[in-house]
Amino acid sequence: MTDSQQSIHGEWGSRWAFILAATGSAVGLGNIWRFPYIVGEYGGGAFILVYLACILLIGLPVMMAEILIGRRGRQSPINTMRALPAEHGANRSWQAVGWLGVLAGFLVLSFYSVVAGWSLAYVPFTAVGTFTGAETGEVEQFFEALLQSPWQMLLWHTVFMAVTAFIVLRGVQNGLERAVRLLMPVLFLLLLVMVGYGMGAGAFLEAINLMFQPDLGALNGEALLVAMGQAFFTLSLGLGAIMAYGSYLTSRASIPGNSGLIAGADTVIALLAGLAVFPIVLGAGLDPESGPGLVFVALSYGFGQMPLGALFGTLFFLLLSFAALTSAISIMEPATAYLVENRGWQRPKAAVVVAGMAWLVGIGSLLAFNAWSGFTIAGLNFQELMEYLSTSVMLPLGGLLIALFAGWVLPRNLTSEELGVSPRAGLFRVWLVLVRYLVPAAILVVFANSLGIIG
Ligand code: TRP
């Protein structure tokens, strides 16, 4: 492949632009909202251990595979997964990977935007001092009240989706790059502030115990599945988002190096979020197993107790909303790029249609907390169903197929060239063994185990 070969959607201005965009995609609600709440629900240390193993042994090799497939194909994931199999004499059904990803993207974005809406709602609420000096019960009630107001949630969900669509319709290059460069480090600093606060005022040692003392007996098949799904979710893998971003990457950039950097930064942020949340939760006697509201309740309580908390809190929820925005735009990219390529639509039209559809599905998720809370399938309400189907089923399935495609269909000389190493290099051999054998086997075992077929 030559450098002159580019995606019709453009190319990142520099290597840093890709790293920023991909890290922006990875770091989001998955790290700060979802990670702490599932760690609390699935029992702490052992769960984190499995999660870290999944990041390293499954996430990292799949990320390399997704980026290299994207950069080789230079099209939207659906068309890349049509063109590459054709080029290499493989079955046409590989294209289903692209479609699966686009579908998963709608499901993910629909509830993602609702939760991002909570974060947006907390910006003005924190700013006016709602949580200043509040008791735990009041903070919990406040969150509960938000869940009971479909109109309020609809407002914030709509605002978030509209801003996301607006950023996506402006295109790859002139998106958020500059803002992200400034905002992400500030989010990082604020997390450090919260960890520092927890060290002083919270139950820090208990939190360390909860997070890093694995009780392997507490792990069941469901916990394994959730930990693996979270590895995909937090690294933005399995639905083609990183593949689309890879298709805008110059051929000169190192895929293994960038992947390591992105996964490393993402993991650090998730662990910091845990270290910020759990000292407050345990110190204030909140319930670690309280589910999706955990971070909102714990952090707003913490901000209410600390000096300058209203200021820090406002800033925090604002930055969390930004982090969610840079993730949401990547979830939209595969479907948007596809509509531009195959329908010949202008990018603005494609972006508005994609966002509009996800917005509509999202209404189901926000009603799941109130009017529709009685509707459940297999014990899951609409929002839980969307989260479960996409994160625990579709993303790992997408990752499995991506790994098989990169490992078995694409020839070694091509993949090693894209990864920038010799086919005989140790790094390449390890990667190949992982995507060919370990990743598919691990995903299948976790699936089978959670279905009760084995184990
Ligand atoms: N990784 C993001 C987060 O942690 C969410 C996200 C962005 C995502 N793009 C994705 C999840 C693609 C799955 C697939 O918040």
Image: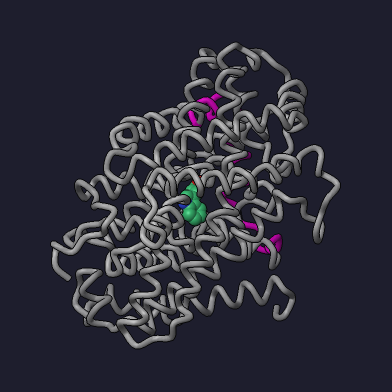
Q: Residue at x 45, y 42 (%)?
A: 269
Magenta region: 195-219
Residue 391 pos. (x, y %):
59, 58
Q: Residue at x 55, y 73 (%)?
A: 443
Residue depicted at x 31% and y 46%: 172
In the image, is residue 124 part of the stretch drawn in magenta?
Answer: no
Residue occupying image coordinates x 68% and y 54%: 42
Is residue 148 in sight in this rendering?
A: yes
Q: Quadrant of residue 447?
A: bottom right
Residue 351 rendering spot, x and y as whole percentages? 44, 46
Image quarter in which the C terminus is found = bottom right
Please name whichever residue, 274 or 329, is drawn nearer the observer in this view of the structure: 329
207 relative position to 242: left or right? right
Query: In the displayed structure, does residue 138 sit left or right of residue 256?
Result: right
How would you classify the magenta stretch by its main secondary structure?
helix
Position in image of residue 428 (x %, y %): 28, 75
Tell me the quarter of the picture where residue 118 sits.
top right
Please say whether residue 209 is one of the residues in the magenta stretch: yes
Towards the viewer: 292 or 178: 178
